[in-house]
Amino acid sequence: MKKKILIVAAAAMFVFLFAGCSIFNITNNADKEPLPLHNGTTTGNILNYGFSVKTGDELIFRYMYGDAYPAGSTVRSNPETGDNSLVTDDGGLYMNLVGSTLYYCKAEGIFRADIDNAQPELVLEKDVRLLQIYDGVMYYIENDTIDAKTTQGEQTEFEPIENADSLNVYSGKLYYKNTQDGYIYSADIDGTNSEVVIKKEVVMFCIMDDDIYYIDSITGYIVRLGLEGKLAVAIVEYSCSGFNVNRSNMYYTRYINGESICCNADIDGGNEERLSDFGDSKWHIVNMYNTGSLIAKIEDFEN
């Protein structure tokens, strides 16, 4: 375990901490997974800037600091073997991996590159965020509006949705937060038939296994609510500024004695561990996988 920490930290200086005493916290309680989570909670990763994806035993991530590779490049790392290599000296955020093709976002637009023979090409010349790819279509937010194009950057039948944030593409539906009232809405995959799902003002949310996890705007608590009418349950009763969750555990940032602390807990909010203190940073960006998580500061992506 110690060897893994040293190797990965040398390859990716923006990686700060993983659950427990190791960077890679192995979890083994997914014997009966109803659906595979290839990238942990995919939407949760995208909401957290989508700075890494997982393929097989390897992580592909945006390289932030250090001298091993160019800053801002894309690197692949195998935490089990310690093997690291450059995918491309280009890179971006809101990564999606479709087969062996990596899609990512920069101010110049959406790019794609084959991870085994990386020569990035511009797919769509738009400055977008929260890119998610579903059934050959790229869904994204541009200027607070959900829009869509094919993975070739071509027009597809879609009705843009205005005043939107926290885009979730889940089980053939679009879910999003309306920025005017803060409520969670759903819409058909072509952007039509929008309707309120949760009449509650939220900060952010993601969906996993038909449960919606969200931060309540009033209390700051992390709440779980089933899409099929289950009762809402506050699973973290502290004021939180950001979170991510998979089937095994969850990461969130909350205030403890005036400091912003990144914590790890089980899926119901129990057995909390305090992991890191980033001082004035209000939101730690956490990309989660079934075998661990990458943690960084929000400032690392905004500066």
Image (cartoon, helix red, strand yellow):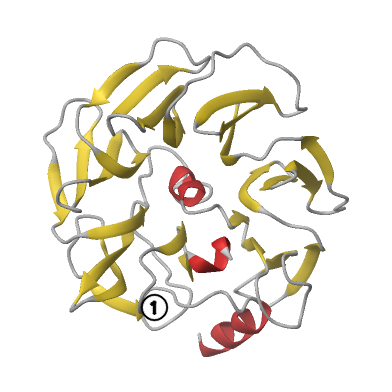
Q: Is residue 178 above or below residue 156?
A: below
Q: Is residue 13 above or below residue 195?
A: below
Image spot of residue 271 (x, y percent) = 19, 70
Numbered label tally:
1
Q: Which residue lies at the image location 57% right of the left edge and 33% below the top edge?
A: 140
Image spot of residue 229 (x, y percent) = 17, 26
**Residue 97 shown left or right of residue 28 in the figure:** right
Q: Quadrant of residue 259?
A: bottom left
Q: Is residue 271 above or below residue 218?
A: below
Image spot of residue 37 (x, y percent) = 47, 45
Q: Nearer the viewer, residue 59 or 133?
A: 133
The C terminus, quarter of image: bottom right
Question: Hey, what amino acid is under mark 1?
Answer: Phe
Q: Quadrant of residue 284?
A: bottom left
**How busy is the neighbourhood of tag 1: few (under 14 within 10 Å), some, or many (20 plus)?**
some
**Residue 240 shown left or right of residue 276 in the figure:** left
Image spot of residue 64 (x, y percent) = 65, 71
Please tell me whether mark 1 sits on a helix, a strand or a loop.
Answer: loop
Q: Which residue lies at the image location 87% right of the left edge and 53% below the top edge?
A: 117
Tag 1 residue: 278
**Residue 178 shown left or right of residue 190 in the figure:** left
**Residue 175 shown left or right of residue 85 in the figure:** left
Q: Which residue lies at the image location 57% right of the left edge and 74% below the top edge?
A: 14
Q: Nearer the viewer, residue 181 or 62?
A: 181
Q: Nearer the viewer, residue 71 or 87?
A: 71
